[in-house]
Amino acid sequence: MLSMEASSTPSTFHDLYSFGIQVLNTKDTDEKVNLSFLAQQLYEDGKIRVRPLDPNEMVKVRPPSVPARPDNITIVHPKQLHKRGAGTVENRAALIHSICHMESYAIDLSWDILCRFAILDYLPDEFLIDWFYVALDECRHFKMLSKRLTELASFYGQFPAHGGLWAAATATENDVMLRLCILHTVHEARGLDMTPNNIRRLREAKDFESADLLNVILEEEVSHVQKGVKWFKFCCAHAIREERRKNREEMQQQDSTQEEEVDENLIRQRFHHLVRNHTATGVLRPPFNHELRLKAGFTKDWYEPLIPSDETNASPSHATTSNDEEEVIH
Ligand SMILES: [Fe+2]
Ligand SMILES: [Fe+2]
């Protein structure tokens, strides 16, 4: 029951995949949130499956290349964005608005990785379920921030926002390992690095309500990075085993039926290679939130080899660039 015809309603959906497709084809962010929460209720009541019963349904109905997005958000170049200081109420609203906008994209990104790669049969249902629960976190983050905007006499849609947030998703749409590396570890971990600074600015401006909200979100984002690292390791180990199996086939050696261990150093080397070759700069710049990265299992040996030599002795305070800020996915 995956048809996206006008007659499709959530009551006809029997799996998370169908809900994901519907969320991605829905423009309004509040509606995306409501659909996600309905999926949660049905899934937790045991009324819907994870994948469709017939896997061909996932071949017939694919996620859109670019998700439907709200009509009322004016998209501009990042340089035209409202200044994000925290001194005035308007500036604080603009700051919260920019984070709210990223959370709305994070909802789409979580559903997109679930739907786009559900078709890979080596990925267990646990992969989809993990990203489903990330999507639900992102929905709650969006709701918390859009409610906070109304308390600041604003609303989601009041300020222009930048539209480059889907570019990395498009660039990684054919490669689950690359998607996990670039978006769900590198970009998501950048959120852990930058949020404490925003919390500090809000506290300095005595906006403790907004600061507390960002603190709750920050704690929850740790588990998103943890899932990024977990599934990157899984997919990378699978790719390495497949390469070994093909090599054995070519050399007409007997295939090993056992799941071979893959050295984690090898997995980290693949990660470094992907960042060097598939990001704009090929490097990662400090400051890093080592404490929360560690909590997520994203240890220094994953990212410190990617620091350029001109940064290794730099003080953390000068290193954050506005460009980093544009790349963050919460
Ligand atoms: Fe979030
Ligand atoms: Fe997140």
Image (cartoon, rainbow, N blue to C red):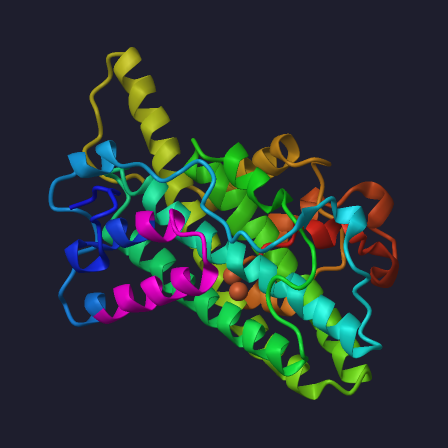
Q: Position of residue 29 (x, y in %)?
A: 47, 60
Give above or below for 194 relative to 187. below
Q: Position of residue 266 (x, y in %)?
A: 49, 38
> How many marks can you see?
0
Residues 226 and 18: in front is 18
* Residue at image location 52% in from the left, 68% down from the top: 142
The answer to whether 201 appears left or right of 241 in the picture is right
Q: Position of residue 298 (x, y in %)?
A: 55, 57
Give above or below for 256 relative to 186. above
Give above or below for 5 relative to 90. above
Residue 201 sits in which quadrant? bottom right
- Residue 22 lies in magenta, yes or no? yes
Residue 135 sits in which quadrant? bottom left
Give above or below for 283 relative to 47. above
Principal SS element in the magenta part?
Answer: helix
* Residue at image location 75% in from the left, 70% down from the top: 197
Find the residue positioned furthest to the top.
251
- Residue 292 lies in magenta, yes or no? no
Residue 297 in sight here: no
* Residue at image location 30% in from the left, 39% down from the top: 260
Residues 48 and 278: in front is 48
The answer to whether 39 appears left or right of 222 in the picture is left
Which quadrant would the C terminus be assigned to in this image? bottom right
Q: Position of residue 253 (x, y in %)?
A: 24, 17
* Residue at image location 65% in from the left, 56% down from the top: 190
Residue 34 in sight here: yes
The boundaries of the magenta stretch are 21-41
The answer to whether 268 appears left or right of 55 in the picture is right
